[in-house]
Every structure is written in C-alpha cells, then in structure tokens.
Image (spheres, coloured by chain):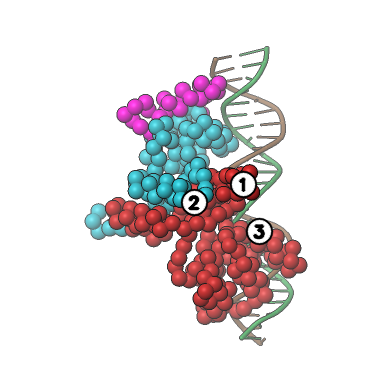
Chain colours: A red, B cyan, C brown, D green
Amino acid sequence: MPDAAAKPWGVHAREVLARSGRLRSGVRDRVIDLLAEQRCALSAQDIEHVLRQRGRPVGRATVYRTLELLVEQGLAGRVEVGEGIARYEPLDPGGDHHHHLVCRSCGRLVAFDDPGLERAIKRLGERLELQIDEHEVLLRGACERCRAPAAV
Amino acid sequence: MPDAAAKPWGVHAREVLARSGRLRSGVRDRVIDLLAEQRCALSAQDIEHVLRQRGRPVGRATVYRTLELLVEQGLAGRVEVGEGIARYEPLDPGGDHHHHLVCRSCGRLVAFDDPGLERAIKRLGERLELQIDEHEVLLRGACERCRAPAAV
DNA sequence: TTGGGTGCAAACTCTTTGCATGCCC
DNA sequence: GGGCATGCAAAGAGTTTGCACCCAA
C-alpha cells in the first residue's frame, strides 16, 4: 500500500521504471495511476474495464505486460486469492506489507495487518529448517459489512 | 493429512461417500487410494498422470468431478499455490490442519503446522470485526533439502 | 531514426460442461 | 432397469505470445 506521507507510490513507480531504462508511455501511466488510487488489489481485467470505462481503452496484453513489469521491479505485488485469478496491488517501498480477507458474501478483498501474525511467522521460520523469503496469509470469512448487516 | 492411528483416510472417505448415497466406482476408488498415499497435495493432472502410468487411465473430467465431490464432502482440501493450478490433499477428519511452503528451487510442497501461527490467527479474528471461517498460509522460500544442499 | 511499447488475434493451460455410453445397485 | 458414473470432445476463463504498427527519445 502506498505511503502517502512520503513519496506517492505513482511517483516512485515512474522513477524506478525510468531508472531501469524503460520508456514512459501513456498506458503505463494510466495503469500506475489506477493502481495508486486503490486501497486494495485489482485484477488485470478490472484494470482493463476501468480504463475502458474512462474512455482510455487499453489492450489486454499490454495490461498484463505492464503488471508483469511492475512485479519484476518490485513495485507491485501479485495476490492469488484462488479461483484462478491474479490480483495486483502497489507495494510499499518501505517494505510494510499486509494480508487479505476474502469475503464470502460480497467477494470484497479486505486488507489488514497484524504484528502478532508477523511475529508468529518469523518464529516459525526460526523453528523449522526452512528459509522463508515470502509469506502470504489469506483468510476467508465475512467482512465487517457482511458480518453485521443490520448495523449498517 | 490422514490420521493413520485412527481409521485410514481412504476407508473414512469411502464411508462418507456411501453414506451420502454415492455409487462406488473403480475410478473413485483409485483416486481415493492415490490421495491416501500422499503426504502432501497433488494436482488433478498429477493424478491423471500417475493413474495412467499405473495402467489405469482415467478421463480428465472424471478426476475433476471426483475431486470436486471430495471437497464438497469435506474429505479433501484444495490448496492454491498460485500459478493457476489447484492441488488437492486428504483432510484429517479430526479437524487438524497444516499449511505449506513452496520451495523456490525444487518446487516441492512441504507441509508444516505451527500452534503459534494458529493462535495468532485466532487472536487476529477476535481483534478485528471479521468472522474468519478459514485461513490459508503459504510460505515461499527454500525447503530443508535446498537450503543446505551440502549437508545432504 | 530506432528500439521499446502497443494492440489484435491466436495460442496455451487449467478447468468445466454436454452428451452418449457404461456400470453399480 | 434406472440413475449415477464415465469419457470424449468442445467450450470457457484467464493469461501469454507472435507479429506488424506506432511512438517516445
């Protein structure tokens, strides 16, 4: 998730791409801006749809290629929530990260972070003979909206 | 993972299916037996290949239908490690569960369990306004074999 | 001008579905 | 005999690739 207090993610992303020798382009700018607006992950198709709705249609292949590039450069993360679709989200350059809950009722993806969980995973890595480079926690259940529909 | 000390998973699975009014069949028996042998998850294609190698070719559709049935009945679990392929593993009737590490070098899936991790997730559910029905933890890194190749 | 970027369409992979045939009870 | 189970092939969904055209530097 972008850290608004420091440098906006979009700016950071463009800098990293420029530094890696990539040309700047309209499509990449639009994809980056769209991701920068998000609080959570979007699928490639979401991105294609939104950009089309905004009157800036983009080729599907280009969306995938741009996302691949962002992931390669460590700018975006790929989240797999199952069902065979990948979602992408901006990654905090500071290294902070979070996990997701997929709501069974509304399908919404809710982000959260939890130091206790991080600690448990760190200890686990020490306990086992494993080297853990990355971890992903996915919860399935009901989000706060769907859990207490009457309260809303 | 099957609990060998109690009733073998394969026996349990056949009983559950029979109780739910399903016909017994050769293909289902073979898929159940193959899963029962495994220490960890297999993909639908793995299953198809192994059964073909054993001289008992099975239609792809039937494999998927059988796996779907096992998941429906709570007998098997679907593990999504990304890359768009689903893997299936026998589920301990006792409710015990574990998580996985995908090895970056050899692609092996290693199962592990960790009470600390379970506790952290339980607390997390209490802390947030979320109802957590299920959780999945996926680690990526190096398994013990690939981490210390010289030691083996 | 030139090499990277883009879009279209076709290819690919994993999975699901339709339908005729086969087998269990 | 009746219905579920099976297999084949075709359909689907998401993603990747090939290739000709376009644009930024």
* Sequence-earlier tag: 3 or 1: 3
**Crowd around label 3: few <14 · some 14–19 · many ≥20 (10 Å):** few
Please state the extent of the stretch shown in magenta in the rendering.
B1-27
Task: Between label 2 and label 1, give the one nearer the viewer.
Answer: 1
Up the image or down, A46 lies above or below B21; here it is below
Q: Horizontally, is D13 left or right of B32 in the view?
A: right
Name the mark on residue A46. Answer: 3
Q: Nearer the viewer, residue A92 or C10?
A: A92
Q: Which mark is residue A17?
A: none
Q: Nearer the viewer, mark 2 or mark 3?
A: 2
For the residues bearing labels 2 and 3, Cβ distance under 8 angstroms: no
Q: What amino acid is at disc 3?
A: Asp
Residue B74 coordinates in the image, percent (x, y): 49, 33
Disc 2 residue type? Leu
**Residue at the extreme right of the image, as rendered:** A55
Residue A151 disc label? 1
Q: Vertically, is C4 above or below C25? A: below
Looking at the picture, does residue B26 appear above or below residue C18? above
Residue B36 pos. (x, y %): 40, 33
Q: Are marks 3 and 1 on the same chain?
A: yes
Q: CA distance from mark 3 to mark 1?
A: 30 Å
User: Residue at (52%, 35%) from the top-left corner?
Assistant: B71
